[in-house]
Every structure is written in structure tokens, then in C-alpha cells.
Amino acid sequence: MTTPFVRTAPSPTGYLHIGNARSLMFNWLFAVRHGGRFLLRYDDTDQARSKPEFAEAIAEDLAWLGVLPDASIKQSERIALYDAAADKLRAAGRLYPCYESADELDRKRKRQLARGLPPVYDRAGLKLTAEERAKLEAEGRKAHWRFLLDWEEVGWDDLVRGPSHVDCASLSDPVLVREDGTYPYTLPSVIDDLDMGITHVIRGEDHVTNTAVQIQIMQTLGGALPAFGHHNLLTTASGEGLSKRLGHLSLRGLRESGIESLAVAALAVLTGSSDAVRPVSSLEELAGLVDLAHVSRAPAKFDEHELETLSARTLHQLDFAAVEERLKELGIPASEPFWLAVRGNLARLSGAKDWWTIVEGPIETHIADPAFAAAAAALLPEEPFDQTTWKSWTQAVAAQTGAKGKALFMPLRQALTGLDHGPELAALLPLIGREKALKRLAGEAA
């Protein structure tokens, strides 16, 4: 295989959501798996809707996911390339001017549908004489420019779908240049892929028809075709498409709610494939799991509740090195023993702060039976404590008091932590230490 150079091409017109993450992660993981490179391309030719703050948010979201582009470009800075390509297509007779207004085109489509015909552009612009074009322009009409499709079947071997084809006779000639001279998605996408040497275009199946058009444009311009792969799209659990309007499913929203980025990445690409959704410890591990050939043709239904569960499961198996800096950001000068003690009880990393408070104190304790607590305090071993201290201590308390089961363990947990649930006390007791444990058993805040 040629060393892959892949790209993600978000439009900075809103925040990325988990559906966008599916496509960008497929590309990033493909590059990681095959030792390739990854391009971040801002499709920002829509100057009215593109905002700098959304471009900044995209970069932040990628960084949060652990995706670091090898290169980054903005289409708004590459207009001269698109102008040159449009001129080349005009010279080749493949780009022709049309003068219909949006309302006129809409009426044409409705008439065709009413007659039971496909709403395909009738190439009226192609039939205009030079005199007719001059007359329309004298009336103040401005041309939009369409690419003249060859009415042929375009095929390719899709990385996901296998042998694929589109009959271009069923398509309208696409508009490549708007009336105001700006560019819709199609031509800039083609030119950037050719100019940057993109080898693999991996994107959603909603682009299958676009691929046939883009292949024709690439062939006209004389460029080498990349390989194409079209994965299924994420939908909501009810089957609805995801959109930027679903703010709580934006990557920013998920990040702010404390969802683990590795869980987002894993669910985004393993959902809708033959690989089971599972927690991973790194993107490298995930790259080893993801295979485009395993992606299903059926819609990939995304369940928000599954993401919550996967996020917690991901957190539970992260080692200390993966969270040390994040714990420090929470104000927790924590150690590996602390992390290993509490991680299995966390739904969000932020919850570690509560357990750090319980370890460090001071906390209010609950003493249901002062006599029992006093007996337990008298039997508490001298330090140093280790993982065996809890067992030997509770065995001694049981022998002294006759308490067993819940009657033995619950009063000690409530005295030491102020709670009736939490991490194993065999791991917490050495962190709390003897001095604080004795004060808490005496009913003191410590």
C-alpha cells in the first residue's frame, strides 16, 4: 500500500458532534495503523457561515480526542488554485454558464416531478447561443457554472462497500461556481485532494454520489485518483440523523460533561461494525482494532447511555500515567495507590476529587455504636499499613465483638469515610492513615 495521506474536512460553521468524530477518527486511525499522515482541512469557503471561533473549537476538539494533524490548511486561503482549475475546465469545454435563478430552477424541478420525471437539470444553459448569453447578462443576470458530466457509469473499488458504481446519467450537472464567483464544496475538495496528494478519501456514505462526480472532475484535470471508502453514518437510537443542532452531543458538550475522549473515539468507530464496542487504553490500541472491511452497510445506531457506560469502563482501566496530569488539574496531588484504589468507583474523573477529600479530610463521620467504634480503635494495628492491614484488623474486631458481615464492615466504613459505599477499604485504609482513622473512630472531624 502507498503510504496513506488522509484528511478530515470540517466546515467551521458549528461545533463538531460525535457523528463528525466517526469520519475523522476513521481517517486518523487509518493513518496510525498504516504509518501514514493526516491533514486537517478547513472547508471554509462559505464566508457568511464560517466563524473563527468554530475553527478554534475544531482544533481543540481534535486535540481532546488525541488527534494531532500533520498539516493544516484553509480553503479560504487557496482560492487562486480553484480559479485556475475552473479556467482549465472552461477551456476544456467542461464548465458551462447557466443563468436560471433559484426560483426558476425550483419551478423546473417541480414540473419534472409532477410529470413523473427525475428532477435532473435539463442543460438549458448549454444550449444558449453567445447572443442569448449576452442578452441575459445585459439584463443583469449573472452566470453560475456547471460541470458537464459524461453520461456514463463511474465505478471504483470502495474500501468499505466493495465494488461500487454510480450512473452519472441520473445526476444533474453539478454547480461548481456560484453566481457571485464563490465555490461550493465540490471543486475545492477535488483540487485540494489532488494538490495535497491525498491517497485515501474516507467519509460517510452520504458522499457516494459526490464521489462519482469528483472522479470525473479529477480525470478531466488529469490527476491521480485516491482510493475511496464510504462508511455508514451514525444515527440516534431512534434512527434519526445527527446534526450540529444536537448541542449535547457536540464534542465540546461531551468534553464539558466529563465523558472520556477514548470512549467517544471507540464508540464512534466500533458502533456499526463487526467489532464489539469495548473500552480501550489508547488510540494505538483502537487503531489495531479498526478495520474498514468490518464496517456494516446498515446504519450505525448511537446510544447516549452506552457512551456513559463505556466512558466509565474506560476510566476504570486507565493507568495512573494516563490521568496524572488531569488529576493535578483538579487540584489532586494524587499518587498511583490512590488512583488504583478509587478508579473503579468513578463515573467521571472529576469524582476523584470527592474521594481525595475523604482520604485527606477533614470529613464528618457517622458513629452508630460508640462502644463498637472504641473497641475497633483499640485493635487498630500500628503503622505502616499495607493491603493486608484491613483484613487482619477486621478479623481481630470480629473476634473481639462477635460482629460479622454487614454488622462488622458497615459501621467501620461509615466511621472511616462517612459513607455506606465506596472503594475497597483494604486500599483506602493505608491512604487514610492511623492518626486520622483513630480520630474518625472517636467521632472527630479528621
Image (cartoon, rainbow, N blue to C red):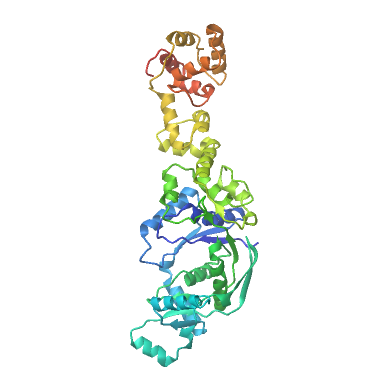
Q: Residue furthest bottom?
A: 131
* Rendered position, 82 above or below 74: below
Residue sitting at x 37%, y 18%: 445
The image shows residue 403 at horizontal and vertical percentages of 53, 11
Q: In which quarter of the image is the C terminus?
A: top left
The image shows residue 416 at horizontal and vertical percentages of 45, 19
Residue sitting at x 42%, y 30%: 354
Residue sitting at x 49%, y 52%: 18
Q: Say whether residue 247 is left or right of residue 158.
A: left
Using the image as rendered, state which of residue 413 and residue 76 is in the foreground: 413
Q: For residue 54, which quarter of the picture?
A: bottom left
Residue sitting at x 63%, y 62%: 161
The image shows residue 418 at horizontal and vertical percentages of 42, 21
Q: Say whether residue 145 is left or right of residue 406.
A: left
* Rendered position, 134 above or below 181: below
Using the image as rendered, state which of residue 369 and residue 292 is in the foreground: 369
Q: For residue 150, which quarter of the picture?
A: bottom right
Using the image as rendered, state which of residue 386 and residue 267 is in the foreground: 267
One can see residue 321 in this view: yes
One can see residue 222 in this view: no
